[in-house]
Amino acid sequence: GQQLNQSPQSMFIQEGEDVSMNCTSSSIFNTWLWYKQDPGEGPVLLIALYKAGELTSNGRLTAQFGITRKDSFLNISASIPSDVGIYFCAGPPFTGNQFYFGTGTSLTVIP
Amino acid sequence: KAGVTQTPRYLIKTRGQQVTLSCSPISGHRSVSWYQQTPGQGLQFLFEYFSETQRNKGNFPGRFSGRQFSNSRSEMNVSTLELGDSALYLCASRRVAGSTDTQYFGPGTRLTVL
């Protein structure tokens, strides 16, 4: 099925640092969603993007829908220990209605 | 508004048994998708139901089946359990409104097969 390339695969950062991760696709997407998942729990929706070029913030999180509609970026500013988890991108491609997911970025914040 | 609920949260079964998992979507959402998540394979799509009809299906054997009821609640059944079926099973409720399409996950059911 459709694969979303997400990078980096893992990140180890100091508390207070900023974080950037991105997701790319070979197809055009209608929607980009970013989720955070804690161990043993379901993913929680962080930010939803619906228009090319859209930039949306949720507290210290900012995400952008790439203008080519084939990529998206998530930034976390001033990281704190509770930011630890796995972050996923997801969305339905323009030509289909099934959701596809990135492979995830594992974030570790060192106090 | 209540979120997606899944029951049970934890389940332990033995090989050869069958299991049924339940999911209640967010009120008003008519689409429910099921995913299997394992450390090695990540999130794998099982199937999606919309208005009681299976709309999409992933690449899983026929032992995995599902259904959706008229109130949008969904169940997933796995027959003849294998050790490799041990995983976190996630249900997602989907809302499509105009140009927006969003999916919300439940807390998951952790299935352990012994």
Image: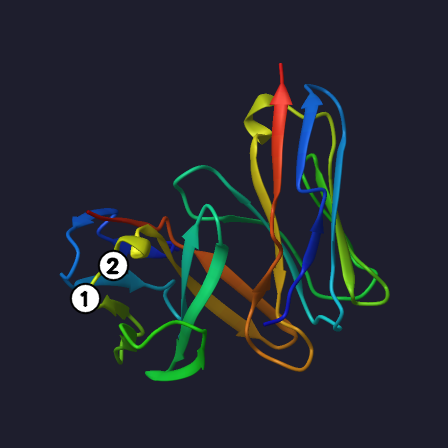
> Horizontal and vertical percent for residue A53?
83, 61
- Which residue is located at x 78 percent, y 60 percent? A71
Instruction: Return the chain for callout 1.
Output: B
Q: Tell me if residue B25 comes above or below residue A108 in the rendering.
A: below
- Left or right: A58 in relation to A97: right
Q: Nearer the viewer, residue B25 or B89?
A: B89
> Horizontal and vertical percent for residue B45?
46, 66
- Which residue is located at x 76 percent, y 56 percent? A72
Q: Give the number of the disc on residue B80.
A: 1
> Horizontal and vertical percent for residue B64?
30, 71
Q: Nearer the viewer, residue A74 or B19?
A: B19
Badges 1 and 2, same chain = yes
User: Could you tell me the amino acid type at mark 1?
Assistant: Thr
Where, quadrant-wise, is the N terminus of chain B in this rendering?
A: bottom left
- Which residue is located at x 50 percent, y 69 percent? B95
Q: Mark 1 and mark 2 in contact? Answer it, CB < 8 Å.
A: yes
Q: Is residue B29 visible from the viewing direction of this image?
A: no
